[in-house]
Image (cartoon, rainbow, N blue to C red):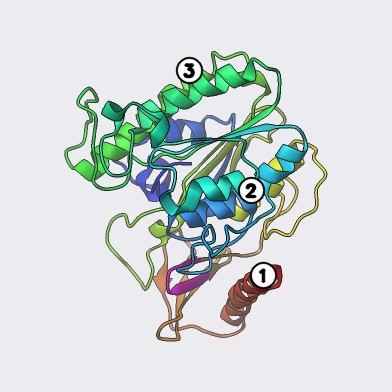
Amino acid sequence: MMESMSARLMDSFGNGQHLTPTLDSLYNSGGTMAFDRCYSAGIHTNHGMTATLYSFPALMFRNLMKGTVTPKREGLPTVLHAMGYHNMFFMPHEAQYDNMKAFFTTNGYDEIFSQENYPADEVVNAFGVPDHFLLDYGLRTISDRAKSGVPFLATILTVSNHPPYRVPAFFKPKSDAPETQIVEYADWALGRFLAQARQQPWHDNTIYVIVADHGKIVGKVGGELPESYNHIPLVICGPGVPQGRTSALAQQVDIMPTLLSLLGASYSYEGFGVDLTKEKRDMVFYSADSHIVARDSARCLVYNNKTQASFFYDTQGGTDRPTRKNGAPYDRLRDYAFAMTQTAQFILDRQK
């Protein structure tokens, strides 16, 4: 899970700065299942993790990993744990950040690795260790645990593409600005990890998922909420994974049911996703603090919860163009976004 890796940073989506050769190769090699229109649940890391791992959407500002009592969630880690998997989570920063250690220990993970496990001289800023160190540490640990023959889930959360940017001195980027240099570095670190993973004995029996926790603002800000904030890459590859690049709509909550389908797993489900190998979405929904958004293949609705104002966009042609058009298609998007948000809140209230 890559920090702030908006799809709009990639050449595959028109960037043109050649910042992400690894990600672009994964998109265009034909050997992966790559999604052109995937959206993050929110714009914070905790949103990306609860959506990706537990198929639960973001509720604007709310952090679903925190509470008076650590929340309990059913998701990919708990299902795999019940199937006998050994689950590992690797984070770059301190374990208590966003209540991560307590949350993930409560919800299916066996081992949590954090800044407390790493040498102090590897910590480069307040957010912990750089991507290449974290990925190296993760690879060594995964390979060690895999010797037992027990199947595993390994989740690695990177952070380098988050200010303050610290590009390692040994890395020589081609671009000039720190905010693009760090993207080059993050992509390089991912490519290095994948190359080393291919040499491991567990590689041929492993499914890889590469996704961002959320996007970031890229380029000029247009409209009420820039698409780049939530438009993210999603790549799945490994044995049994359908191959090809698709323009089908997808969102982070779809990752759990898709992966468990690929594994042939049986499980009870109270999530919000669909199996992307078998189903196609008509619409996606997401949030960004005070905004609730819904999209279909041709249009986008953005609702500002503070001002209670709606904004309408025609998305045909790959860009969001403001329009004065309203009517039934946008009413359908609004109803969908509100219904999903209200259902998520209902589930949380019921669980209390």
- Classify 10 Å Cα crowding around label 2: few (below 14), some (14-19), many (20 and above): many
Does residue 94 appear anywhere in the picture?
yes
Residue placed under numbered mark 2 in the picture: 107
Q: Which residue is mark 1?
A: 352
The answer to whether the residues at label 3 and label 1 have Cβ atoms under 8 Å apart is no
Q: Nearer the viewer, residue 342 or 141?
A: 141
Q: Which mark is residue 196?
A: 3
Residue 209 rendering spot, x and y as whole percentages: 57, 37
Q: Is residue 289 magenta?
A: yes
Q: Secondary structure at mark 2?
A: loop
Q: CA distance from mark 3 to mark 1?
A: 44 Å
How many residues crowd mark 3 within 10 Å: few (<14), some (14–19), many (20+)? few
- Amino acid at pointer 1: Lys
Q: Which residues are magenta?
A: 287-293
182 vs 300: above or below: above
The C terminus lies in quadrant: bottom right
